[in-house]
Amino acid sequence: ASGEMLGCFGLTEPDFGSNPSGMVTNFKDMGDHYLLNGAKMWISNSPKADIAVVWAKNEAGRIHGLIVERGMEGFSTPETHGKWSLRASATGELVFDNVKVPKENLLPGKSGLGAPMMCLDSARYGIAWGAVGAAMDCYDSARRYALERIQFDKPIGSFQLIQKKLAEMLSEITKAQLLNWKLGMMMNEGKATTAQISLAKRNNVAMALEIAREARQIHGGMGITGEYPIMRHMMNLESVVTYEGTHDIHLLILGHEITGIAAFK
């Protein structure tokens, strides 16, 4: 909390992303400590983090959170290289090979998958806003470029098709902002549900991706260059549409809420 240490959150595994309950990372009670084994993947900050909040199953198959500290024997954090998206983020794995974890490092008060899912609800709300920010930047860049770029002796912003694109971008951004505002008011009142948060994350990220692609077209060939922010947002959003619940998983969360029938299996 003081900002002196960097943390990370370990839930996703190499074989369990959309199905976190199937995790195989586990810990055993060894009397005076726990023995942790397993691995996590696609973990932001892992190569640099001082501590990791790790979700693992005990011998009864119950999910708990453990605080794992850098320097513990058997704990390593290999970095993921070759990313074309979120390149500014240090991403990696968490690997546990018979790591001895003190018993006081077990997170108290919460067990089961509901504990990490509460964190994901908050993160997904933040993502719903972040996606709007990316869309706003793409729109603003496209609007300015449309007024500056001259073709057929006039700014391309004077043509109906460009104005149509800009008007639709602004409309979609405004709707997403209002969705987030309403959701935020409901969260303040303790009334927002997981399904409603899923709706906002899914809708707003898809909206931002579409706006990034339309903005890239307005910029023409210049849109693929680093002189403009479009491709950076577009590539990053390709990660955002997958992480913290994929686009299709959020669809199924909504479907479950609508029908009462889970279609995950």
Image (cartoon, rainbow, N blue to C red):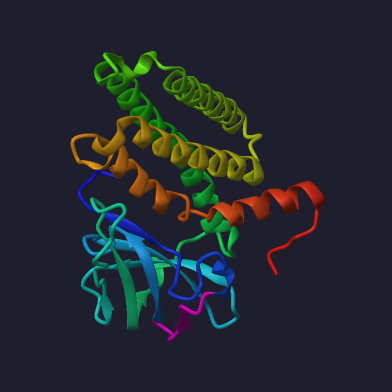
Q: Is residue 130 visible?
A: no
Q: Is residue 65 found left or right of 231 in the rendered image?
A: right
**For residue 152, what is the image quadrant?**
top left
Residue 258's x, y, as percent?
77, 46
Q: Is residue 186 visible?
A: yes
| Vertical comparison of 262 with 241: above or below | below
Of the 4 image quadrants, the one containing the N terminus is: top left
Residue 224's x, y, as percent?
26, 42
26 inside magenta stretch = yes
Residue located farthest toward the front when viewing the structure as drawn: 152
Q: Which residues are magenta?
A: 23-34
27 inside magenta stretch = yes
| Vertical comparison of 101 with 153: above or below | below
> Residue sitting at 18 percent across and 35 percent down?
227
**The one of 264 and 64 positioned closer to us in this rendering:** 264
> Residue sitting at 32 percent across and 70 percent down?
93
